[in-house]
Image (spheres, rainbow, N blue to C red):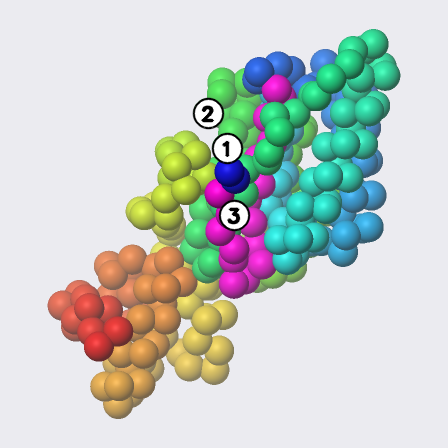
C-alpha cells in the first residue's frame, strides 16, 4: 500500500528521481541535453513552473510549482519520455527509474531558498565539481541567463547577485532537505540580507523596524508570520529590535 504524498499549500515541491538500482541515467552530455529538452516540453504541457534543477549521474532534482496532480503528470511525461530515448539509444529494456519519484512540500520562502541552495550544491557535495562551475544545474540562471526557470519570485528575495552568491557559500547537510523530509533547522545559515528580503515580501507595506511599535496582538501575529516563513528568532530580533524572549512567547502562544 502506497503512502499518500504530503501536499503543499503553496503548490511547491522538491522532486527527486533516481535510476533503478541507482544506475547511471546520463552517459554523456548529449543525454543531458535530451533530458532538458524533454523536461522543458513536459513543463509546458503541464503548465508547471520550475524554480531549480540539477542533473547528477544517477538522479536528478527539480523544484517545481504546480498542483501535485500536475507534477505527477509532468514526471510521467519526463521520466517516460527520457526512458524511451535512453533505452533506444543504448539498446536496453526495462525500467530506467525507480518506480516512484520522491516529493517534499515546500511551504515558506525560507525553506524554498534552502532547497534551491541544496539542489545547486549537489555537485560540490558529491565532489564532482564546484557548484558555481557545474554546467548541469540552474545556478547560473539566477546570474543573468535564465533558460528553464521562472526566476523572478526567487530573485526578488535577494538584493543582487552578490547576496545570491553569498547565500550559496553556506553549507546545507543532505538530511535537511528531502532525504528525511525534515524541515527543522533548514534555514539556520540564512544570511540576514536574505532574511530581510523574505520578511519584506511577507509583511508587505509593514516595515520590519515598525513592528516593535504595533499593538501587541498585531505585533505578535506578524512575529509568528516571520517564524512561519523560516526566519530564526535571532534574525527576527536583529531585524525588528524585539527581544528574543518576546518573540519566543509570541510563538509559544500562537495556537492558544
Provide the secondary structure element on which disc 3 rests: loop
Q: Is residue 238 visible?
A: no
Relative depth, front residue between 104 and 117: 104
Residue at the spot of label 3: 5
Q: Is residue 69 above or below residue 102?
A: below
Range drawn in magenta: 3-20
Residue at the spot of label 1: 121
Q: Give the residue drawn at x 62%, y 21%.
A: 19
- The first of marks 3 and 2 along the sequence is 3
Q: Is residue 34 above or below residue 193?
A: above
Relative depth, front residue between 37 and 99: 99
Residue at the spot of label 2: 125
Q: Nearer the viewer, mark 3 or mark 2?
A: 3
Relative depth, front residue between 132 and 203: 203
Residue 14 highlighted magenta (yes or no): yes
- Relative to 220, is 91 on the left or the right? right
x then y, percent, for residue 177: 43, 40
Number of residues whose C-alpha sits closer than 10 Å to that of mark 3, classed few (under 14), some (14–19) or many (20 or more) = few
Q: Give the residue drawn at x 63%, y 49%.
A: 64
Query: CA gap, disc 1 to disc 3?
Result: 26 Å
Provide the secondary structure element on which disc 2 rests: helix
Label 1 close to label 3 by CB (< 8 Å): no
Amino acid at each position: 500500500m502506497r503512502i499518500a504524498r504530503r501536499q503543499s499549500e503553496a503548490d511547491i515541491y522538491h522532486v527527486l528521481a533516481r535510476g533503478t538500482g541507482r544506475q547511471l541515467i546520463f552517459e554523456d552530455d548529449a543525454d543531458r541535453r535530451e533530458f532538458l529538452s524533454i523536461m522543458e516540453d513536459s513543463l509546458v504541457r503541464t503548465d508547471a513552473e520550475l524554480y531549480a534543477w540539477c542533473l547528477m549521474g544517477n538522479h536528478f532534482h527539480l523544484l517545481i510549482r504546480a498542483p501535485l496532480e500536475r507534477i505527477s503528470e509532468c514526471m510521467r511525461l519526463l521520466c517516460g519520455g527520457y526512458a524511451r530515448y535512453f533505452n533506444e539509444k543504448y539498446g536496453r529494456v526495462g525500467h530506467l527509474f525507480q518506480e516512484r519519484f520522491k516529493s517534499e512540500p515546500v511551504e515558506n520562502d525560507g525553506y524554498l531558498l534552502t532547497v534551491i541552495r541544496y539542489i545547486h550544491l549537489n555537485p560540490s557535495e558529491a565532489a564532482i565539481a564546484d557548484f558555481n562551475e557545474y554546467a548541469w544545474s540552474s545556478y547560473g540562471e539566477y546570474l543573468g541567463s535564465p533558460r528553464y526557470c521562472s526566476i523572478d519570485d526567487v530573485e526578488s528575495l535577494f538584493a543582487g547577485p552578490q547576496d545570491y552568491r553569498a547565500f550559496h557559500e553556506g553549507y546545507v547537510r543532505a538530511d535537511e532537505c528531502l532525504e528525511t523530509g525534515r524541515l527543522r533547522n533548514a534555514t539556520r545559515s540564512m544570511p540576514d540580507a536574505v532574511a530581510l528580503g523574505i520578511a519584506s515580501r511577507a509583511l508587505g507595506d509593514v516595515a520590519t523596524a515598525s513592528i516593535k511599535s504595533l499593538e501587541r496582538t498585531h505585533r505578535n501575529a506578524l512575529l509568528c508570520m516571520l517564524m512561519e516563513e523560516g526566519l530564526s528568532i535571532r534574525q527576527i530580533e536583529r531585524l525588528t529590535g524585539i527581544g528574543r524572549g518576546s518573540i519566543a512567547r509570541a510563538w509559544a502562544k500562537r495556537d492558544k
